[in-house]
Image (cartoon, coloured by chain):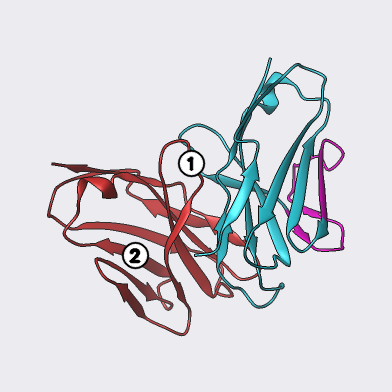
Chain colours: A cyan, B red
Amino acid sequence: GAVVSQHPSRVICKSGTSVKIECRSLDFQATTMFWYRQFPKQSLMLMATSNEGSKATYEQGVEKDKFLINHASLTLSTLTVTSAHPEDSSFYICSARAGRLGMYTEAFFGQGTRLTVV
Amino acid sequence: GENVEQHPSTLSVQEGDSAVIKCTYSDSASNYFPWYKQELGKGPQLIIDIRSNVGEKKDQRIAVTLNKTAKHFSLHITETQPEDSAVYFCGGGYQKVTFGTGTKLQVIP
């Protein structure tokens, strides 16, 4: 399958600071990227969908001003957690696919980022 | 929106036996159903997927079946091995995928 690289794999930050997570598709052009959040022993909760060059679409209940998503190129999307608080501590995972909306193709996940806010 | 339910939440099988995980979905517009395997501390890995124009798909020891009328789809793993132990997520959707709650599979040597 295709390779999606997510960085960093782990990050610890102080409460009130911002953290940026990168998601890169290494061997294909990702027209659509998804960002998920996963709590321990729970499922993957979609936070937002981003298409290259356009604004991200956020799921209900996800604060767009807190979780900033940028998808500036076909191989890179970033998620910035602004003014992080301990309750933002979680496992964040991106996935990327080559197809545009309406034509679903396989999505490949990154390795995930374990964020701990202290 | 789509709602995907997955059962069982945990499953223990003896090595060599088969394992079956079942999912249901609610949105008749959903046409893509992937299955992912997630090992501890890692991102999910796509293991097999099926589209709504197909009723069954097989890849070595793994097979997926889809019943569009009943809105059911299932993952079948035959001849299970200890390395199959992981959490498995089913997904369903059209433009975006909604995931089930996961099944923790334990294969006992």
| Above or below for B53 versus B63 | below
Residue B27 position in % (x across, y down): 56, 68
Marks 1 and 2: CB-CB under 8 Å?
no
Is A55 within the magenta?
Answer: yes
Query: Which residue is more in the foreground, B32 or B84?
Result: B84
Give the magenta-colored segment's residue range: A49-71
Give, as a three-letter code, the residue at label 1: Lys
Q: Are marks 1 and 2 on the same chain?
A: yes
B66 is higher (above) or lower (below) than B9: below
Quadrant showing the C terminus of chain A: top right
Q: Is residue A92 magenta?
A: no
| Label 1 CA crowd tier, 10 Å (few <14, some 14–19, many 20+) | some
Query: Residue A34's spot in the image, x, y percent?
Result: 68, 55
Q: Residue at coordinates 65% horizontally, 67% vertically from top-left?
A: A28
Q: On the image, numbered disc 1 is attached to which residue?
A: B42
Q: Could you tell me which chain the residue with mark 2 belongs to? A: B
Q: Secondary structure at mark 2?
A: strand
Residue type (three-letter) at the residue carrying disc 2: Ser
User: Which residue is at 12% across, 54% downward?
Assistant: B16
Q: Residue furthest front?
A: A27
Q: Which residue is mark 2?
A: B74
Front residue of A110/B2: it is: A110
- A15 relative to B104 in the view: left or right: right
